[in-house]
Image (cartoon, rainbow, N blue to C red):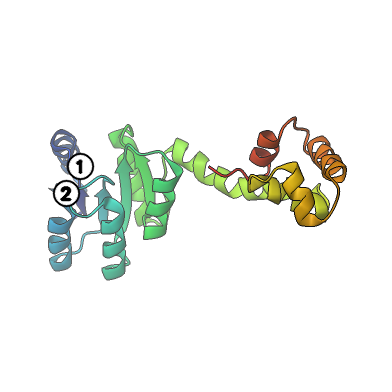
Amino acid sequence: MDGIKIILIEDHDEYRNSMNFLLNSNPDMFCTSYSNGRQAMEYIQQSPPDVVIMDINLPEWSGIECTRKIKLAHPKIQVIMCTVYEDDEKIFDALKAGANGYLLKRASISEIFDAISQVLHGGSPMSPAIARKVVASFQQPQHVAAELDLLSTRENEILELLSQGLRIKEIADQIFVSVNTVRTHIRHIYEKLQVQSRVEALNKTGKAKY
């Protein structure tokens, strides 16, 4: 069989049928589609494709679980997530499971064709909104570290106790200083971080507990 061999795993009938038709309209591609990851895996074991296009919300096995199984059994298969989910947890769970790309379902067919070409040439295609989240995730720790570097060792210690929900009196008792000393440290923390409250300080330094 000539061309790029693709398996589409998608449980939404209308989207699956439409995408299957569009992928097969490309003379360089041959697509087989499944609504269930377990069924698709049986076929993959017999005849590994070049690329798998995977939804996340699937029956029996989630797309993330299915991706993990595929990559363990066939590391060379390129997996592109194609989903409506934009939250950080889903994105990073998918990438950690071995996904090579992450597209949103609003991507056009030309973008999907381009993504398939990219993964087959060593790229990691992502929808712009997803790429921005990935970049931001690497920038955030640096930003937080810079904010924490502004504070003294004692101020960082007090900030950590504030993040645990301790009151000023409780902090004073724990670190064996007066209440006024704790208040002074907190005032210095706010000044250095350019914030007005405990909540703002914790959010700015990534210490907020949700």
Image mark for residue 23: 1
Q: Nearer the viewer, residue 36 or 108?
A: 36
At label 1, counting other C-alpha atoms closer than 10 Å, the crowd grade (few under 14, some 14-19, many 20 or more) is: many
Q: Secondary structure at mark 1?
A: helix
At 70% from the left edge and 36% from the top edge, which residue is drawn?
198
* In this rendering, position of residue 42 left or right of residue 183: left
Amino acid found under the numbered disc labelled 2: Cys
How many numbered discs sit on the rendered protein?
2
Query: Residues under labels 1 and 2: Cα distance?
Result: 6 Å
* In this rendering, position of residue 78 left or right of residue 158: left
Where, quadrant-wise, is the N terminus in this rendering?
Answer: bottom left
Q: Quick check: 171 above or below 196?
A: below
Q: Quick check: 151 above or below 12?
A: below
At label 2, counting other C-alpha atoms closer than 10 Å, the crowd grade (few under 14, some 14-19, many 20 or more) is: many
At 78% from the left edge and 33% from the top edge, which residue is drawn?
194
| Residue tagged 2 | 31
Q: For residue 156, say whether it is visible.
A: no
At 30% from the left edge and 43% from the top edge, which residue is drawn?
82
Discs 1, 2 touching: Cβ within 8 Å: yes
